[in-house]
Image: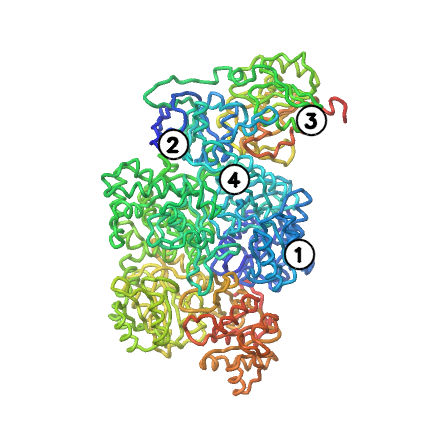
Amino acid sequence: MKSHIRKVVVLGSGALKIGEAGEFDYSGSQALKALKEEEITTVLINPNIATVQTTEGVADFIYFLPVTPFFVEQVIAREKPDGILLSFGGQTALNCGIELYRSGTLEKYGVEVLGTPIQAIMDTEDRELFVNKLKEIDVRTPASIAVTSVEQALEAARKLGFPVIIRSAYTLGGQGSGFCTSEKELRSLSQKAFSYTGQILVEESLKGWKEVEYEVVRDNHDNCITVCNMENFDPLGIHTGESIVVAPSQTLTNSEYHTLREMSIRVIRHIGIIGECNIQYALDPRSEEYRVIEVNARLSRSSALASKATGYPLAFVAAKLALGFGLPELKNSVTRTTTACFEPALDYIVCKIPRWDLNKFTGVSHHIGSSMKSVGEVMSIGRSFEEAIQKGLRMIGQGMHGFVGNRNMEFDEIEKELAEPTDMRIFVIADALKKGWTVEQISKLTRIDSWFLYKLQNIVQLEEKLGAFQSLDELPDDLLREAKIQGFSDFQLARIILKTDPEHIEHRLLDVRKHRIKRGIVPVVKQIDTLAAEYPAMTNYLYLTYSGVLHDVPFEHDNRSVVVLGSGAYRIGSSVEFDWCSVSALNTVKKRGFRSIMINYNPETVSTDYDICDRLYFDELSFERVMDIIELEMPRGVIVSMGGQIPNNLALRLYQVKAPVLGTSPLSIDNAEDRHKFSSMLDQLGVDQPRWRELSDLSDIYDFVEKIGFPVLVRPSYVLSGAAMNVVSNRDELDHFLKLAADVSKKHPVVVSEFIQHAKEIEIDAVAREGEIMAYAISEHVEFAGVHSGDATMLFPPQKIYFETVKRIKRICREIAQELNISGPFNIQFLARDNDIKVIECNLRASRSFPFVSKVLKTDLIELATDVILGFPVEKLHKSTFDLDYVGVKAPQFSFSRLQKADPILGVDMASTGEVGCLGEDFYEAILKAMFSVGYRIPRKAILLSTGEPRSKVEMLNSARALKEKGYLLYATRGTQQFLEANGIDSTVAHWPDEESKPNTIDLIRKKVVDLVINIPKNLTKTELSNDYLIRRNAVDYNIPLITNARLASAFILAFCKMDMNDIKIKRWDEY
Amino acid sequence: MNEPRKVKLLLEDGTEMTGKSFGYEKPVSGEVVFNTAMTGYPESLTDPSYRGQILVLTYPLVGNYGAPAEETENGLLKYFESDRIHISALVVSDYSFQYSHWNAVNSLSHWLKKHRVPGIFGIDTRALTKILREKGTMLGKVLMNGDTVDFYDPNRENLVEQVSIREKKVYGNGKYRILLIDCGVKYNIIRYLLQLDTTIIRVPWNYDYSKEEYHGLFISNGPGDPKQCGTIIEHIGRSLKEDKPIFGICLGNQLLALAAGADTYKLKYGHRSHNQPVRLVNTPRAYITSQNHGFAVNNETLPSEWEPLFINVNDETNEGMKHRSKPFFSTQFHPEASGGPTDTAFLFSEFIRNIQEYIGEE
């Protein structure tokens, strides 16, 4: 090991976004653990306050600052580290590191880049360098020829052979790219492309080739291993982040597997990786021809998946190798006796399935392809592909019960859907198989290897067989067992055999459960041991399967274990914050002398690290599976309040079968979850709430809206298409929405609520014990109500709320806690206008903001809550929230740039994919740090203003004046310009996108004349394609910071007009 | 499709497991061993080292890519390690009745039936592996249709005799003449050597090669207990007195050790996988290797003119040895892989370099 390295800076990846999510909390945490083991002082820079890695004790020093060269340099200057780790914080950290290297900053401060040298990183990042580097060792990459005319394109295609793909260099959104099978097609497409750009690339097409990845590790003695290979179920052309992926590969022969493996090693030796990297191949499905697609010289989403798939701690080992250790010196942390210099042997199959949330966005295409749109993923483990895929499809958590047994999964245009895949593709395959399409037909259209399709066909055929039975008693045991081996859930069986309707299925699936337990058809627990049982292993990493007869582990049944239910797939609305809560709960359980048991299935998390708990069940969070585990473990209790909505929703059902749910009674949880029960409780307490009604008749809806007045929030319970929830401002919109989105009936009522505008939104996160509040944190939103709380910018402690408001909020909170007899964490959201307080939501579980307020307070509210839940005495938190002499700001991160055509606008549905939290001595400093952390910059030149309705125009007036005083050039759309002029502020008219006159808003954006765009939508409805949309979308596509909320825009503008980058203090968390 | 027939796997310790048949239906007995490789069943099934053994694959999904065609190349079957299936029976968890691969011509089931080898699926292979691991390997039998068969211990027989070639056979027409003692050689060894400008003289295990003209001696892999192969050990002993380069693999390593005067023993945990790390002695270099052996050379018993060449990083057992002064070396692992990683294929070139030096080319 390098003995001169005593202090190391680790760069995090910032907020979670599409393409860069929780996997880097996992890899960063592992790296920090590895450094800590060597007694190296660690300095972490990461503004993502909800992560586990930014928890006290994980790193020695933590800076909640943007991962940008400006801030990292200042931290380096202050901390004087010996080394820096760049490969644990995704592309964000890598890019930042490359910039610091290029600018000479690292050299200036004598900071050594640990692990893969920068030159090697650059060789993999630059396409041309990369292709040439691989050419040196005769490794093939896709052939590509740059051309500048149609004739040249044709010539290039003749050379490469049809089909070819043409790509336009330097255009956005894939305009002018496409697939050509003939000269005619190429001629027409390239002509079109040349209207956008002067140069196009003609590339050989690898459409339909298999996509295979290897995770490769190398130490500085040149020892190399491949830890895992993975095969994409979807063929090349679909981004690996959008693909279903299995590990290990299933359709490769020994020769294919090892040819690619050997090449992986050759490539990373030649590039000079030290640590870990990922290499992606295209493999011809009809020969051993291959191409190397790319190498990622850092930990990646795939490496996190490979770690979880194999039990091999890639990030931990990579960090040790960066310190100079050799692979054979390191121990396999699963067996603890064998070496880390080996390649895991799996005796199971894992299946990764992406989770999309495309319904949350307007305008975005549902087609999946070469760019990533998924927001999370799940990993399922089984001993048959059928078991793994069915488990995985349930884990995704979008109402599916597996590959079959789902409702309303019929598709009209199967052929088209198969050929042009969307996020529903797997269910299209199910429908096609049921309708008698052959594997050959489906394979031809999808290019999915027939092996996978045969396996899926097995599921469909078994469903048919099962469907022929009407009762459990006539069902042969062998067939029932086979169904379980193929991953059928009790729910599916209840639906397929008992033909149960949705209303009674919860009850009937218990009958299935009872029946199969009686027949001795139960799952077994197997270990993930990295060696397929070849040597004894000390491993607590477990999963359940029906392909087996013996458990690998004993069950103590000593009343000393506590189960914590995790949060499942990351998705919009539930992400790393609940992982932090889960991990904190596990730590507390352990600290109190109990054995901690985790159930979760998200490969991007720290909670699914097997060394975080005493037992990890990497398995479903379904009622069935949780009960399987509870019946095996017979734990002291189950904690359902840490993992967000998934465990929260299980609480009542677990309670009904007498499972030991700890903390707040599930009956209380139900009282808070059930709209009617909660509402009548508030009425009883005399607590105000926005008026609402659940209505199933159109005339009742109109009558009610008449009474409360527009705007109203409409929530259909059954959605045909489009948005689930909308705010409508007038009768026309209401008509339109009800027609478009909802089938209103007794069975599918609509909830209509009063929508209060211009009200402050305030939240309280608190912990109570038997109804008595032990700790609380009140925070306020910068934006007015109407922006989803997950998309809001949050301030803690609050800066601008009345004392009286706080008093009332505390009183209401106390009353609710008492009434529901809460024991554990909870969160209540309020609207406040003047001192008029209304409750809008109450969750008897940890909320999204628990890590944020805990870290600002420097008091772990989850630890406190867990102590309450476990029945340990706790002291009331005396630290008053107003005593802090600093401010925390939590800001959302959006991923609109990844979601082509989506309207980057905020509304009642959440759209952000992540968040950051930063500290400052005052509000301005904190909000600047937070805004910089989510990609905003201080504009240098000009700002484009389009400030919407009169009220927001007024709201923006002061900040416009401040901008003017700062000397910024202001462009404004006509109405805004007139309003500004009337108020004595000069600005230049910028014409709407659909106008001919110059300067045009779109030109200003595309030519980067403006470097900040403020576009405040005029009303609250989701508008169709419009001028405003074009302005917003172009701002996103051309990477010009965009703000669409007047309150946030004002706050940000006033902040950067008051202070400069250099006024921002570089302070560690512990220095506040 | 007919419902597959139920099959019983019975171990000598009384363990009984029930699965279903996907292979030839006849009762068999043998030594039950496992392999943790995740690919390469056509290679394993035709590996002569598995002679007399009932093979359990720990990787649960088997048969995915079917069985390749029996094409020949340079007088050898192109996609297999010998001319037939050597295992006595195959035991898996999840057999894939449908297969998909461009070079497959048959299903694994069809291929097993053709070679009259039983196959069982639906067995908890992980539970089975843990039993085998703890008790060392064990005898077992595969029973169906109420038939019975006695336990059979292949280690008491001269298995090498069963798998070795019957008559001398010559491959290639290269410059360097290699005398290959066939104890059950895997074809990939011959394939590797043929790439290096060689002529291979493959001789039966007990063949007296003292009259043959050659530049280097190769001792192949093979099944069973090395101590059953007295004749070969005797022949090798004579070669050790000469200076012609020697290279041995697997059983070849053990035979060479016995001929040199060292001892072999049965391992507590046999090595049967594609992921075994070995360290090149006195260096920080390690390689991932393919292994399949239940016996090992005792490092402590190596005579003074010999030293360990490779050591297993996990259990420190012998993975190869070399002579301190003469061009003799051997490995316990399989540099020819097939199946498994190809990290140590350079050893074949090493052998040829020794030959070049010996004949005065360098």
**Residue at the image point whose x is 50% and y is 79% from the top:** A956
Residue type, label 4: Asn
Q: Amino acid at mark 2?
A: Ile
Do marks 3 and 2 share a subunit?
Answer: yes
Q: How many marks?
A: 4
Could you tell which of marks 1 and 4 lies nearer the N-terminus?
1
Is the Cβ of the residue at disc 2 closer than 8 Å to that at disc 1? no
Which mark is nearer the camera, 3 or 2? Answer: 3
Badge number at residue A332:
4
Q: As displayed, is residue A501 above or below residue A172?
A: above
Q: Kindly report which numbered mark, 3 or 1, lies closer to the viewer in this rendering.
A: 1
Q: Dividing the image into 4 quarters, which one contains the N terminus of chain A? A: top right
Q: CA distance from mark 4 to mark 2?
A: 28 Å
In the picture of the structure, the residue carrying the numbered disc 2 is B123
Whether labels 4 and 2 share one chain? no
Q: Are marks 4 and 3 on the same chain?
A: no
Q: Amino acid at mark 3?
A: Asp
Q: Which residue is mark 1?
A: A151
User: Along the horizontal axis of the image, is A1032 left or right of A131?
Assistant: left
Instruction: Give whichever of A766, A486 is nearer the camera.
Output: A486
Q: Tell me the residue that label 3 is attached to.
A: B197
The answer to whether the residue labelled 3 contacts the one labelled 1, judged by CB atoms less than 8 Å apart, is no
